[in-house]
Amino acid sequence: MLPYAAYLRVYEPLSAFPEDERKRWTAYAASRQRPRRATALQAEHAESIRRLLAVPPMPAPPQESRDAYLRRVDDVLYVCPWQTRLRSWLAFSRLRGTTPAKVMDRFLPKAIAEQTADDFDRYKRAGGSAALRTHIHTSTWHIPTSWFVPFDGAERWLVLDGKGVRGKGSAAEVPAPTTTPVPIRNLIYVTSMAQARRRVARALAVIRKHVGEVATATEVEQVGRWLEEFHPHSLVELDYGGLVHLMDDETLEADQSVAELSAALTGLDTGQEELAYTMYQRVISRWKSIQLLESAN
């Protein structure tokens, strides 16, 4: 069973990488040994379990991952590096910063925790803030509302029993992964970076104009700033990941969170307050009920 987590990913075109990395990713794409899309999440999860069950446990791998998620659109290769070591360090830092010391010692021996923190500090000093840029954001047990903003309902790609159902409309210009194996059940959105940035800017303007500087505006702004760090011709993907295991097929088919949030923003901007409230509450209620499962027994 995969972790109950969703992923927001950025795939940069091969041309965005330094020459030595371009050569490596080109060879990687041609390799038959690399993890395929259908098994990539399982491979990531299995590797992390092996590290945590090791004696002593390893919160982060000793070397950065050389794996990546790949997409091809019009013969252009797009790459989303896993960055497992960096993402593990960041997750470890969040856990350590929010967990009491006595509880943290139960998770990890103090010496290992301190060594991991020291390794991360050395990495940050050597690489600066640019070294902390990740191509993948992870959210457990729910999807933040701000993650739906960069997408359009027509870019929805639902897979049930290995069969995909695509959204309709002109926004569905970026192909979903129909040419490569996909998980049996999944829900994915994918769009161009230009579209994603445009939608984030529009949402931010609408929220600030009609609601003000609220927490939602801050969250949308953070997504926008993250997207600005990447090549303008990149692709952006929202992957429901392991969260699909918290929903049956009927619930997945009914999930139109992206379209509903877009309708809420349009209603807010056009003075249709009842529509805006209804659509927004529909999204919030859906994900609150799923998030509550974290504390269920």
Image: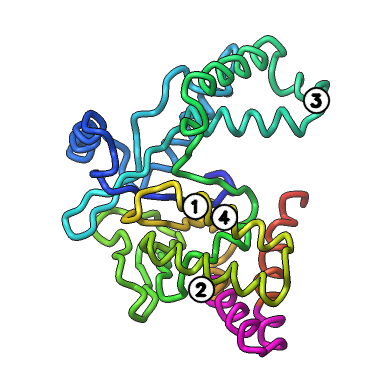
Up the image or down, 6 lies above or below 88; here it is below
Labelled disc at residue 253: 2
Task: Name the residue tied to disc 1.
Answer: 8
What predominant SS class does the magenta segment belong to?
A: helix
Left or right of 228 on screen, residue 148: right
Image spot of residue 267 (x, y percent): 62, 85
215 inside magenta stretch: no
Labelled disc at residue 243: 4
Proximity of marks 2 and 3: CB atoms separated by less than 8 Å: no
Near-viewer residue (191 or 243): 191
Q: Amino acid at mark 4?
A: Leu
Between label 2 and label 3, give the one nearer the viewer.
Answer: 3
Between label 3 and label 4, give the one nearer the viewer.
Answer: 3
The residue stretch that appears in magenta: 258-279
Q: Amino acid at mark 3?
A: Val
Residue at 57% x, 44% y is 3
Q: CA distance from mark 4 to mark 1?
A: 13 Å
Left or right of 253 on screen, residue 32: left
Image spot of residue 50 (x, y percent): 51, 24
Q: CA distance from mark 3 to mark 4?
A: 27 Å
Q: Amino acid at mark 2?
A: Glu
Up the image or down, 154 lies above or below 144; here it is below
Residue at 65% x, 29% y is 93
Q: Amino acid at mark 1?
A: Leu
Sequence order check, earlier mark of 2 and 4? 4
Up the image or down, 211 lies above or below 95; here it is below
Label 3 neighbourhood size at 10 Å, few (<14), some (14-19), many (20+)? Answer: few
Residue at 29% x, 65% y is 175
269 inside magenta stretch: yes
Q: CA distance from mark 2 to mark 4?
A: 14 Å
Labelled disc at residue 103: 3
